Amino acid sequence: MVRYMMTFAAISALGLAQLASAQSAPTDPQIVGIVVAANDIDINYAKLALAKTKSKEVHDFAQQMVTDHSAVQKSVADLGATLSVKPADSDTAETLKKQASDTMTKLKGLKGTAFDKAHVDNEVAYHGAVIDAVSKVLIPSAKNPELKNALVSTAPLFQGHLAHAKMIQSSLH
């Protein structure tokens, strides 16, 4: 089951980068919508981990994800209001939500160490795919300089999340 979850997480995360790059360049409102969806997804993964894990390390990481991604969501909302850009739907955001729903269903069925491993594996794959999609698709597609700068400025935060998740992953496996 854990191997299945690792494979599912990798496929789901790879879908983010592939979907974003396979379609025409997203508009600024679609970029905001994709960022909002991606942050909501990781907040929901973290909230599930907070409810299920018994591991202090996984719990602390999940709490950091809720805190950091909630702050990013607020800054995206503030920037969108300043720029008069409302998040727009896109096939990418909708597919992300569908994949996240499938992943959540799988994660909810796991307990204990199996959950912790699958959750952290998913976080590693998800953050890697988000970093890739932001750098290769969203930043180059952003037309508004403030939006582009906001995307660039979040890169170190997400890279830190990926490094932290990999550290936890190595301790769990």
Image (cartoon, helix red, strand yellow):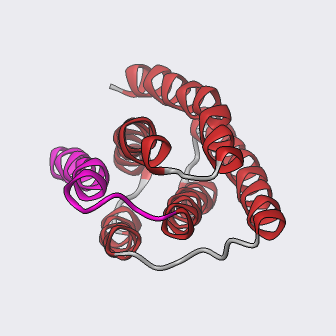
Residue in front for this viewpoint, 29 or 49: 29
In the rendering, at what x and y percent does residue 19 appear?
Answer: 25, 59
Q: Look at the picture and state if 63 lies above or below 12.
A: above
Q: Quadrant of residue 73?
A: bottom right
User: Left or right: where does residue 71 sit relative to residue 155?
Assistant: right
Q: Residue at x 40, y 57 (%)?
A: 111
In the rendering, at what x and y percent does residue 83 appear?
Answer: 76, 64
User: Left or right: where does residue 92 sit relative to residue 7?
Assistant: right
Q: Look at the picture and state if 93 lies above or below 7.
A: below
In the rendering, at what x and y percent does residue 21 appear?
Answer: 26, 51
Q: Quadrant of residue 42?
A: bottom right
Residue in front for this viewpoint, 87 or 171: 87
Q: Main secondary structure of the magenta part?
A: helix
Q: Quadrant of residue 113?
A: top left
Residue in front for this viewpoint, 79 or 166: 79
* Residue 130 within the magenta-colored segment of the rendering: no
User: Left or right: where does residue 125 sit relative to residue 141?
Assistant: left
Q: Residue at x 31, y 56 (%)?
A: 20
Q: Range of the magenta residues? A: 1-27
Q: Residue at x 53, y 27 (%)?
A: 159
Q: Residue at x 34, y 47 (%)?
A: 118
In the rendering, at what x and y percent does residue 110 appear?
Answer: 35, 60
* Residue 2 within the magenta-colored segment of the rendering: yes
